[in-house]
Every structure is written in structure tokens, then in C-alpha cells.
Amino acid sequence: MPGFSITSVTSHDGDVFFRELMGDVVHGMPTDDNGFFGKFEKIELNDLTVSYVRSRGRVALHRTPTPGTIMLIFPQTGNGNLIIYGRQFLEDAICVIGENGDTGFSLPNPANLVVLEIPIDQWRAAAKHTANPDLLEQFTDGVNVLRASGGLPTVASAVAQLRKAVATRNGRSPDVDAGNRGAVVIASAVKAVTARSNMRARLVASKHLCDCFTRAMVCVEEHLPAGLTVSELCAATGIHERTLQVAFRSIPDMTPGQYIRYRRLAACRQKLAKSHPDEVTVGGVAMEYGFLYPSQFAAYYGKAFGEKPSATLRRSPEVRARKVRERHVQLPETARLQLAGMRG
């Protein structure tokens, strides 16, 4: 397929992954013009068998993740740089926990995709060495965690709950370094998801179902923020409702209605995560994306992401940046007195 390629990259040294991916944020390597991430260098190439369907600029992929690994998929630009700067990285990366079964997913107009498949024990080893736990915390917030069987909201909620539990534990446990909070959260999430014993192998979806799913996904994205009903989605795509149900059950293991609602919730989450509480309200964002009842929206949101929407808004980059500025401006009392003495 012209203009589209898949590369599998495996790191045999867990620390290499963070050196290459995070640049000097962690290890003092060069960054890009944004000062965030440097150029990604391929570590080792391996064969990867992928079946794909391209429809309206989207690509639906299927592959069986290797058990015991964590697989990260990134869009890649034509010049070889990963699209991993700022919030774009958090929104575009897809994280797949390696399990038995096929996982389907879709991405908009990728020039290339880079697939990194890393043994979980090496992932944990690398996470222990990172000097930027906030970045790791943002990473787990931003990626979509998929699993071979079961819906996205279930896993996202589990990861969020694990994150909250570990953060609470860090406050009172001397043997857990609070600076490694993000690393501990990732390791806990990976361990919890991969340890589930009720995972079942799923049949590989047919090309026809892949095509139906991809067309439906495109349509859902085009009709955000308000969203569609399942009947409207069937009418817009020309797909019979029964076929649509089978396609969604075969790939993301959700009903079309659940998927539409989840995409609306995810869009709300992205907006809340980018905004400042002085600029938007939770109720206003919910209304914008078609959630008319605040209590119902809060319940859906909590089930999907394991936290209140107001918590997402309070944790936005703008709020964090303001807190950092305030910390830098406010000097301790002794420091201010010393400074005043030096100035006479």
C-alpha cells in the first residue's frame, strides 16, 4: 500500500525505550524545537504481520499482541519523526496490553505507524529510572488502553482507579517513593490488566466487518460533538444494524451505542484536560457533547475514566502551569528576609 508502512520495534533494554522516546526530558538527549521530545531512532526491526483495510483515509488494523508485552502504536510523519509532541502525543498514541487474542483499532490518515513491543518486565525496569513522573502520569491519562476482549471504558476505569489507589498509598507508605508514582501506576496497571484470567481468544474479524467498522468510526467522528443514534449511524453509513452490531462486537467488543457514547465522553475528557476552570464548566462541556443531564453525565464519565469530570478539569495543563508559576514566585519566609538583607 503506497504511503503506508508498519514497523515493529523491540527494545531488549528497558531503559533504551525511555531514552529514545522521551529525549532529554529524562536523560539529557536533544529535544525538538518545542523542547519536548527528540527524534526517534529505531532500535531493532522485527517482522510483523498485519491485515488492514483502508477506507476514507482511515486504516483498521488487526494483530495478535505477544503475551507478556506492552505494545505502543504511534503515528509517524514522513520525515521519520514520531508525532509525540505536547498533547498530540497523548491523544494519538495507542497502548495495547499484550494478551491472547486479536485487537482492532483505527487511526486517521497515518503516514506510517511505528509499533513498539516491549516485554512488561523491561517496561517496569525502565519506568523505575524515569526522572519525570508527571510525564508518566500524563501518559497513562492520555493513551487509550485496549485489551483483547472487553470494552475500552472498563480498562480505562481500572487504570484510573489503580492510579488513584497508588497515589493514596504513596502518601503514607515510606517504602514507595512518591517521585516514582507514575512508574508504579503503569506497572500496577499493566500487571492488573494482564493478570486477568477471564480473557478469551477472539475470532479475527472478516474484511467486510473491518470495513463496516471503519466506515462507522469515520461517521461517528464526523458527527461529534453531538453524536448520532445507532439508527442514524446505520442510515448514514448504509450498514444494516445487525451487521453493525456484529462488527462492533468483533473489534472493540462494544455495542455501537456504547462506542458512540464513549467517543463523546472521550471528546469531553480531551476538552476538559486542555481547558482552565475559569474558561469552561463541566456542565457546559457536557451540554456541548450532547449530555443533557449532569448527574447522568457524571455517572457515565466516572465509569469510563474512574474519576469525576471536575477532577480532569482541575488537572489540566493550564492549572498545572499556573501552580508551577506560583511555586516559583512564592519564596520561603527566610529566603525573602535574606534577600531583603542583601538588598539593604
Image (cartoon, rainbow, N blue to C red):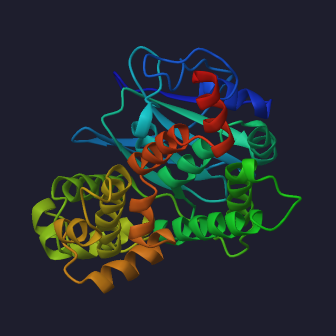
| Residue 23: x %, y % from top left | 61, 23
Q: In this view, which residue lies farthest toward the right?
A: 175
Inspect this view and state whether residue 308 appears: yes
Q: Nearer the viewer, residue 281 or 297?
A: 281
Residue occupying the point 76% across, 38% down: 126
Residue occupying the point 77% across, 31% down: 15
Q: Say above or below: 305 vs 317.
A: below
- Is 302 placed left or right of 343 in the picture? left
| Residue 90: x %, y % from top left | 46, 43
Inspect this view and state whether residue 252 appears: no
Question: Which quadrant would residue 220 be assigned to in this image?
Answer: bottom left
Please state, as top left, top right, bottom left or bottom right, where the C terminus lies in the image: top right
Q: In this view, which residue lies farthest toward the front?
A: 344
| Residue 110: x %, y % from top left | 36, 32
Q: Say above or below: 85 vs 24.
A: below
Q: Nearer the viewer, residue 176 or 209?
A: 176
Residue occupying the point 71% across, 36% down: 131
Residue occupying the point 63% across, 63% down: 163
- Is 87 placed left or right of 30 in the picture? left
Question: Which quadrant would residue 155 be assigned to in this image?
Answer: bottom right
| Residue 9: x %, y % from top left | 64, 29
Q: Say above or below: 84 vs 45.
A: below
Please state, as top left, top right, bottom left or bottom right, where the N terminus lies in the image: top left
